[in-house]
Image: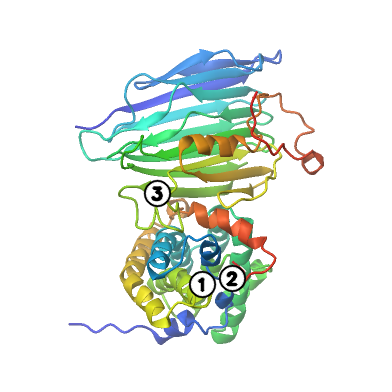
């Protein structure tokens, strides 16, 4: 049986310590905790499942497309159209900008310089991640997996602070979501392989959009989103 | 056995004397169309969608093409809610709306809700093409299940292009059989009614925990609301004052440039 290795570059890119600013975002779970929608490991897992199967799939497919050479301008327009919330649009561009800055140091590549010139105010994060993955020698499957994983790892990590969730329980939630993360990554790669921006998934989560707007107006909050 | 395939067509044009005429009004199969008198505006055309038979059923492929020519004004409503029902074969029904609104034209698309009955599976796709000076008010309401029944599945996508530029492309997939988490705390959190209103009217309502307004493209606002049931959803959408009794008005060039200067919409529930 063939042994398949994960590229160590993927571990670097998906590492929570990669300095791309992701730690400042809760993926909408801070608002969900405040509104009583999430309060324990079980409701956190349900939150993550919903996020993964909606915006997780949409973002992972954008990343997979960008990693396989899709036009970043068209993909950025597609990402914008799939993100109606101004708060989430701004956060995604800010995260894209921060990721690109870190990646230009980590994996110098003309494609990254070109992306920075094309989007001085930042491209949407999944699009940047796809281009970065390619620069790091990774493929569409790696990019989709990284994005799908961070769709759930962000809220889970945030809940350790927001709920005082036992880190062992938090990690158990992530482990239970590992298989769905892989399924979403596979679906994202399959959608990207159709090579048509209009056929990329468009799924959104209404409550994530709605709550992001009121969350952005809170005077004091732990997380940016 | 396969379901019904039907395409209905509506084409509204200005008559050159300030009124709108229906150049084409063609129902098909379960999609029956009736000409009606506009409730508030003599110059605008009004079409009522009337269900001529039970539809959509699983396996059906329904489509409505609406073309509002430059300068025309059209209101489309429906006589009753659209109830999505299971077919004889376990296949999804597809329902597509192609709505094109020309320069200085206006389309108000406000049918009754779509209700996903137990066991049903409907894929709804609304494609809206707007000319730069087009006016629109599009209301979409989705209700999961009739009273006290488990909901069917309802996937709905809204794609909006302004002058060919893609400005909104988002979908939801909810109900029994939808991907995991659809009723969970990130997506619906137990709400059974989901609605959207897309409008070129100036409005900037305050966000609440169940409603929010998003600026989209050039001068469009998308309002999203979640509610426990259809009645509360309608109240939430109408509460923005966007469905004032004025209905379709003649588009005024002052509407759009003056957006920021116009008074805020009333914060109360609209009603006659």
Q: Can the viewer see residue B255?
A: yes
The residue marked by circle 1 belongs to what chain? A
Vertically, is A111 above or below B215?
below
Tally of numbered tags: 3
Residues at marks 2 and 3, CA–CA distance in whole angstroms: 27 Å
Residues at marks 2 and 1, CA–CA distance in whole angstroms: 7 Å
Residue B27 lies in quadrant? top left
How far across and down, in percent of the image, does residue B151 sit?
Answer: 33, 42
Q: Are marks 2 and 3 on the same chain?
A: no
Q: Earlier in the sequence, mark 2 or mark 1?
A: 2
- What residue is disc 2 on? A96
How far across and down, in percent of the image, does residue A151 sit?
Answer: 46, 68
How far across and down, in percent of the image, does residue B171 sit?
Answer: 46, 48
The residue marked by circle 2 belongs to what chain? A
Q: Nearer the viewer, residue B213 or B105?
A: B213
How far across and down, in percent of the image, does residue A171 sit?
Answer: 38, 79
Residue B173 is tagged as 3
Residue drawn at x 57%, y 21% is B12
Disc 1 residue crowd, few under 14, some 14–19, many 20+, Cα 10 Å? many
- What residue is disc 1 on? A129
Residues at discs 2 and 3 in contact (Cβ within 8 Å) = no
Locate the N terminus of chain A by quadrant: bottom left
Q: Nearer the viewer, residue A198 or B220?
A: B220
The residue marked by circle 3 belongs to what chain? B
**Secondary structure of the residue carrying numbered label 2:** helix
Residue drawn at x 51%, y 44% is B159
């Amino acid at each position: 049986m063939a042994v398949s290795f994960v590229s160590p570059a993927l571990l670097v890119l998906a590492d929570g310590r990669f300095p791309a600013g992701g730690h400042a975002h809760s993926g909408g779970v801070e608002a969900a905790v405040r509104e009583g929608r999430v309060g324990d490991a079980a409701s956190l897992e349900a939150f993550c499942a919903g996020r993964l199967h909606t915006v997780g799939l949409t973002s992972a497919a954008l990343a997979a497309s960008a990693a396989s050479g899709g036009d970043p301008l068209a993909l950025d327009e597609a990402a914008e159209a799939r993100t109606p919330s101004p708060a989430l649009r701004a956060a995604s561009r800010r995260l894209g900008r921060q990721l690109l800055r870190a990646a230009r140091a980590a994996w110098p590549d003309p494609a990254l310089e070109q992306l920075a010139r094309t989007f001085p105010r930042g491209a949407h994060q999944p699009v940047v991640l796809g281009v970065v993955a390619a620069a790091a020698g990774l493929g569409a499957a790696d990019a989709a997996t990284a994005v799908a994983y961070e769709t759930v790892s962000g809220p889970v990590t945030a809940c350790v602070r927001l709920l005082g969730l036992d880190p062992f329980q938090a990690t158990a939630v992530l482990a239970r979501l590992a298989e769905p993360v892989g399924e979403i990554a596979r679906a994202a790669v399959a959608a990207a392989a159709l090579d048509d921006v209009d056929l990329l998934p468009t799924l959104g989560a209404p409550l994530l959009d709605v709550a992001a707007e009121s969350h952005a107006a809170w005077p004091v909050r732990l997380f940016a989103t | 056995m396969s379901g019904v395939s039907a395409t209905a067509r509506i084409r509204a044009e200005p008559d050159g004397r300030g009124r709108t005429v229906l150049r084409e009004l063609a129902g098909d199969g379960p999609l029956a169309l009736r000409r009606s008198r506009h409730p508030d505006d003599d110059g605008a055309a009004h079409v009522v969608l009337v269900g001529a038979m039970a539809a959509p059923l699983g396996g059906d492929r329904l489509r409505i093409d609406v073309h509002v020519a430059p300068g025309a004004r059209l209101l489309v409503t429906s006589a009753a809610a659209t109830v999505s029902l299971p077919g004889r074969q376990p296949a999804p029904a597809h329902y597509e709306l192609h709505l094109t609104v020309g320069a200085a034209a206006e389309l108000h698309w406000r049918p009754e809700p779509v209700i996903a009955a137990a066991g049903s599976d409907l894929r709804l796709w609304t494609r809206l093409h707007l000319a730069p000076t087009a006016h629109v008010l599009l209301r979409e309401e989705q209700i999961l299940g009739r009273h006290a029944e488990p909901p069917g599945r309802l996937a709905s996508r809204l794609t909006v292009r302004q002058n060919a530029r893609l400005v909104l492309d988002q979908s939801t997939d909810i109900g029994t059989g939808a991907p995991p988490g659809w009723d969970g705390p990130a997506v619906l959190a137990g709400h059974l009614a989901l609605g959207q209103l897309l409008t070129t009217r100036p409005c900037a309502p305050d966000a609440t925990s169940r409603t929010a307004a998003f600026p989209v493209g050039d001068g469009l606002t998308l309002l999203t609301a979640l509610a426990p049931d259809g009645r509360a959803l309608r109240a939430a959408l109408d509460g923005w004052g966007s469905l004032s009794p004025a209905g379709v008005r003649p588009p005024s060039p002052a509407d759009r440039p003056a957006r920021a200067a116009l008074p805020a919409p009333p914060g109360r529930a609209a009603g006659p």
